[in-house]
Amino acid sequence: MSDLYVPVPGAPALAPEPPPTYEHPNVTLLKDGYTAFAKGDMSLIRGLLSDDVVHRVPGRGPICGEYRTPEEVLGFYVRLFELSGGTFRTEPYSVMANDEHGAALVQTYAERPGRVLDARAVDLFRIRDGQITEIRTLAEDQYADDAFWS
């Protein structure tokens, strides 16, 4: 509705327009992936990954590197759980996407003997035909992330 709208005396008032509720399908895809991750549903995650997926984790720690198949990516996720005694979690607080790319701002948390990781990261995605083809995980504090996993 325009700010210049002037009602005619006796005419019914115009109701404000509700905000759009449309969510891009790739936002839904990414949210479904995080929900599956939180539940440990690796079969659902596998269905979201393309056969040529690559997950890039920069840094110098023992979990850093490139995971180049769905099986390697899933193995990486299992390793995060193993190294943290099952405490690792990543919770998105903002997810955005278009037809080819997505991004999620996430809070990560994990515990190891004598250490706690409570940090933020950005996960960047490439998406093709409804599947994730690339993931890049960028820690807010790469040094702290490397030290935690070392």
Image (cartoon, grey):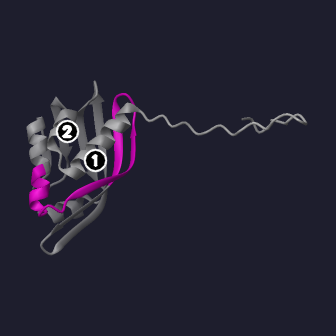
Query: Can residue 4 be found in the magenta stretch?
Result: no
User: How many other residues sit within 10 Å of disc 2, few (<14), some (14-19) or many (≥20)?
Assistant: some
Residue 68 horizontal/vertical position (percent): 12, 36
Q: Tag 1: residue type?
A: Thr
| Residue at left offset 35%, top offset 37% | 28
Q: Quadrant of residue 113?
A: bottom left
The answer to whether residue 103 is left or right of residue 51 is right
Mark 2 → mark 1, Cα distance in angstroms: 10 Å
Tell me the tag on residue 44: 2
Residue at coordinates 28% horizontally, 60% vertically from top-left? Answer: 141
Query: Residue 101: percent from the left, percent from the top?
Result: 34, 33
The residue that mark 1 highlights is 35
Q: Is residue 2 left or right of residue 79?
A: right
Answer with left or right where residue 127 lies relative to residue 82: right
Q: Quadrant of the C terminus?
A: bottom left
Q: Quadrant of residue 98?
A: top left
Residue 84 sits above or below residue 32 on the image: below
- Residue 121 rendering spot, x and y as whole percentages: 30, 54
Q: Which element is circle 2 on?
A: helix
Q: Which residues are magenta?
A: 78-106
Please state which amino acid type lies under the numbered disc 2: Leu
- For residue 8, what is the image quadrant? top right
**Residue 102's mark?**
none
Q: Residue furthest right?
A: 9
Q: In the rendered image, is residue 61 in sight?
A: no
Asked whether residue 7 appears in the rendered view, the answer is yes
**Element marked by disc 1:** helix
